[in-house]
Amino acid sequence: MTGKDGARTAAAGAGPPMSQVESALAGQDAAYLRGVVMVMVAGVLWSLGGLMVRSMEAAGAWQILFVRSSTVVLTVLAVLLWRYRGDCLGKIRRAGGLAVLAGALLGMAFCGFIFAVMHTTVANAVFVLSAAPFLTAVLGWLLLGEAIRRGTWLAMVLVLIGVGVMVGGGIVAGAWFGNLMALLTTAGFAGFAVALRRGRANDMLPAVLWAGLLSALVAAAMAPDLAMTVRDVALSAFMGAGLLTGGMVLFTAGSRTVPSAELALLTLTEVVLGPLWVWLAYAEVPRAETLLGGALVLAAIVGRALTGMRRRTPPFGAV
């Protein structure tokens, strides 16, 4: 073999041309950027939920929940039909009883959120809800044997203190029921997330369908009547189809390219913007205990997300 032949052989074994490598890296960066934008937009959509509830004319919690959950059912069913067409019912059956359980837990969160926002400040509700990732970690550790890093344990202690400050302030101010509903919502979302992890081998989107169906049935049974103004129906339907379902679709798509350590940080758009919207529209000022406890929760989430981003991506189950 001549020197030129050897050089050509070595070059051939060195890998693709640099232009191809650069194109691949650029494609990864673009996919990551799209994922970041989708996750942040999902948080923005979810942040408008409290404002929508505050904007109702006369609808009660059960009436809002019925319309919102019904539109979730219709929207998710449309997505499933578009995605699987003739096999839609088969996909729902294959998701099995675990999807029903996950749906029941998410449906509980659907109910709790409406009552939380109606009986406490939006800031208090969303700050308590932001503790859901850490409660999910605890449930995953207890039920699935997933490992929890030391940094996560420390963050959870800080979150627990922050939530305790907010809930204690709510008891003093007479908003204990709203805080209780916020905690119920947090527990429901955490249980839903653990159930999704358990059934990750299947498409668990049917769980959201079950959540909407079960919460709509409960609301229909509990509501004194379903008479609502056109404005309230439109706002409730927009919450279900546009904000809730739309945000879930964007978040699910974005999480495919965004590392899990960054997701909690990016969805802080919901926690930050939720109280801001109602403050701008209705001058709803959070209590001092809410701001103090919320600051502790935010510090824990941001700190854990930033330390997670400095590590290599962990194996599944490490939080």
Image: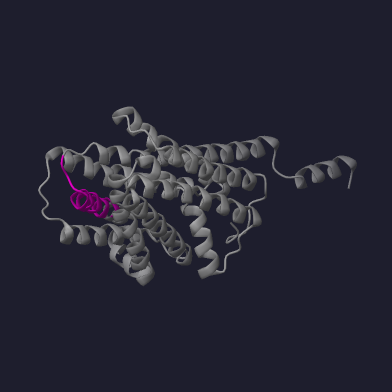
Report if residue 74 lies within the magenta region: yes
Q: Which of 132 and 289 is in front in this view?
A: 289
Q: Which of 41 and 167 is in front in this view?
A: 167
Residue 13 position within the rendered picture, expressed as x and y whole percent measured from the top left? 77, 47
Image quadrant for the C terminus? bottom right
Residue 200 position within the rendered picture, expressed as x and y whole percent measured from the top left? 47, 63
Overall secondary structure of the magenta section:
helix
Residue 291 position within the rendered picture, expressed as x and y whole percent measured from the top left? 46, 38
Q: Which residue ends up furthest to the bottom in the rendered image?
A: 97
Q: Is residue 38 at least partly visible in the picture? A: no
Residue 47 position within the rendered picture, expressed as x and y whole percent measured from the top left? 37, 39
Q: Nearer the viewer, residue 69 or 285?
A: 285
Residue at position x 80%, y 46% in the image: 9
Stretch in magenta: 58-76
Above or below, 144 relative to 132: below
Q: How is the image coloured?
A: one colour
Q: Quadrant of residue 217?
A: bottom left
Residue at position x 27%, y 43% in the image: 239
Above or below, 50 relative to 180: above
Q: Nearer the viewer, residue 254 or 149?
A: 149
